Image (cartoon, rainbow, N blue to C red):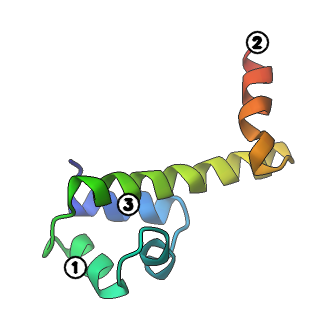
Amino acid sequence: MLSADKLRFLRIKHNITQKEMAKQINKSLTWIVKIESGEYRPSEETYQDWLNACYKAQKKEIAKKLGTKIENSEEKIEETNE
């Protein structure tokens, strides 16, 4: 499991605010702050939700750069890899 600092880094790297992260993983803003300060440790499920939120943000950014909709981003990526 990643450290609190690394979870915070991932959130910031993917341009997700603490408030947005709280909403995406169905937790309170206070909870997010305490996770990032190391006061709380997320459960395995919440940890995976955090990583998934960052992955979705990354996927949106890739789709934006490709100039396509999110639904088509995987197809576009696969097409370029063929």
Q: Residue 47 carries which label?
A: none
Q: Which mark is residue 82?
A: 2
Q: Measure the C-alpha gap from mark 3 to mark 1.
A: 15 Å
- Label 1: which residue? 34
From this view, report whether residue 41 is shown above or below residue 34.
Answer: above
The x and y percentages for residue 5 are 26, 62
The x and y percentages for residue 38 are 16, 70
* Three-letter amino acid code of the residue under disc 2: Glu
- Label 3: which residue? 9
SS at circle 3: helix
The residue that appears at 57% across and 53% down in the rendered structure is 56
Q: Give the camera-side residue of 14 and 32.
A: 32
Of badges 3 and 1, the one in the foreground is 1
* Chain-order first, disc 2 or disc 1: 1
* Three-letter amino acid code of the residue under disc 3: Phe
* Three-letter amino acid code of the residue under disc 1: Lys
The x and y percentages for residue 50 are 39, 59
* Chain-order first, disc 3 or disc 1: 3
Mark 2–mark 1 contact, CB under 8 Å? no
The quadrant of the image that shows the C terminus is: top right
